[in-house]
């Protein structure tokens, strides 16, 4: 067991699903690392959901994601015991597999609140973008046509609030319902090394559904299209830094 990796209070997420899929909605339980036990076991806090304890069942197996100062790790764990000490509830988890670095942070959705905006990509605009990439006609002619299309589309931006973000996609709330399969351009501002950076990305609409708790608002999931390597890395860096700040605040370090 890699005792040098974990610190008391490190965040843990437990998933029932064995696979991490960018577009799949997964049930997630949030806990904290508390201590090591014998025989490849660890003690963690009982998850809390909506202010209530969630007594996970003994014998259940979960995919576990650990957020540490050394990066993100994953393994499978089995609930083998649960108990209470001084009105604090604990779980004992047996680690069934070796810890591995979590290499797919682009698919981890970081919960956030970021203002942004988006608009539909018209068929004409999409055709011009394809021509720009293939250079079927002169770039000067295409650029002139594209700028004219952009001028027409400028009034079609809608304000949105991004509520989670990953290197592969995002989820936002807005007053507009979008059709699955259509494409958008989204804009957002993210602090990278404490410097605001503007992002403009193309995205595919995965789903758009009415919000039960907010009348007239819709929750839309998107997948980024042809995102550049640097853009993806910057988003992942932002997520990792924000997660680290949150852990430090919880530990009273900030």
Image (cartoon, grey):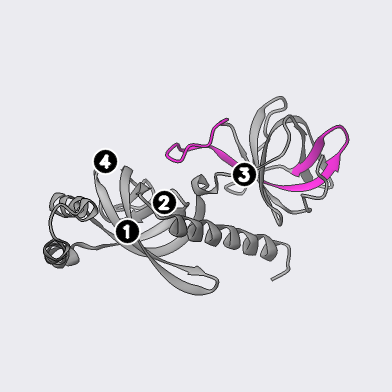
Q: What is the x, y in percent for residue 246?
A: 63, 62
First in residue order: circle 3 vs circle 1? 3
CA neighbours of label 3 inside 10 A, class few (<14), some (14 to 19), many (20+): some
- Dot 2, crowdedness within 10 Å: few (<14), some or many (≥20)? many
Horizontal side of residue 159 vs 135, given as left or right: right
Q: Which mark is residue 102?
A: 3
Separation of disc 4 and disc 2 at Cα?
15 Å
In the rendered image, residue 225 lying in the magenta stretch gets the answer no
In this picture, is 42 found above or below 132?
above
Between disc 1 and disc 4, whose residue precedes? 4
Name the residue that disc number 2 marks.
170
- Looking at the image, do the residues carrying marks 1 and 2 touch, with CB atoms under 8 Å apart? yes
Q: What residue does disc 4 label?
A: 181
Q: What is the spatial separation of the Cα atoms under label 4 and label 3, in whole angstroms? A: 29 Å
What residue appears at the point 67 percent right and 27 percent down from the top-left corner? Answer: 60
Whichever of callouts 2 and 3 sits on the residue coming sooner in the sequence is 3
Q: CA distance from mark 3 to mark 1?
A: 27 Å
In the picture of the structure, the residue carrying the numbered disc 1 is: 186
Labels 1 and 4 touching (C-beta < 8 A): no
**Image: magenta residue range:** 17-44
Q: Secondary structure at mark 4?
A: loop
Query: In which image quadrant can residue 85 be found?
Result: top right
Mark nearer the N terminus (4 vs 3): 3
Question: Exactly how many numbered labels are in the figure?
Answer: 4
Image position of 219 with respect to 180: above or below: below
């Amino acid at each position: 067991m890699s005792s040098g990796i974990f610190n008391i209070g490190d965040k843990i997420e437990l998933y029932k699903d064995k696979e991490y899929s960018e577009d799949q909605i997964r049930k997630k339980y949030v806990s904290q690392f508390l201590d090591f036990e014998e025989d490849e076991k660890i003690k963690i806090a009982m998850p809390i959901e909506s202010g209530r304890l969630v007594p996970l069942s003994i014998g259940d197996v979960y995919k576990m994601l650990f957020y540490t100062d050394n990066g993100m790790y994953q393994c499978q764990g089995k609930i083998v015991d649960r108990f209470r000490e001084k009105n604090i509830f604990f779980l004992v988890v047996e680690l069934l597999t070796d810890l591995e670095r979590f290499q797919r942070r682009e698919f981890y959705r970081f919960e956030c609140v970021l203002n942004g905006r988006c608009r539909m990509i018209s068929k004409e605009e999409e055709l011009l973008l394809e021509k720009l990439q293939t250079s079927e006609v002169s770039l000067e002619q295409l650029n002139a046509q594209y700028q004219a299309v952009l001028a027409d589309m400028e009034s079609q931006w809608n304000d949105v609030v991004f509520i989670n973000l990953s290197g592969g996609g995002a989820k936002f709330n807005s007053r507009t319902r979008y059709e699955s399969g259509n494409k958008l351009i989204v804009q957002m501002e993210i602090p990278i090394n404490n410097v605001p950076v503007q992002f403009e990305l193309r995205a595919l609409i995965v789903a758009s559904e009415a919000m039960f708790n907010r009348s007239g608002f819709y929750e839309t999931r998107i997948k980024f299209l042809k995102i550049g390597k640097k853009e993806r890395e910057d988003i992942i860096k932002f997520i990792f830094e924000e997660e680290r700040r949150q852990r430090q605040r919880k530990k009273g370090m900030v």
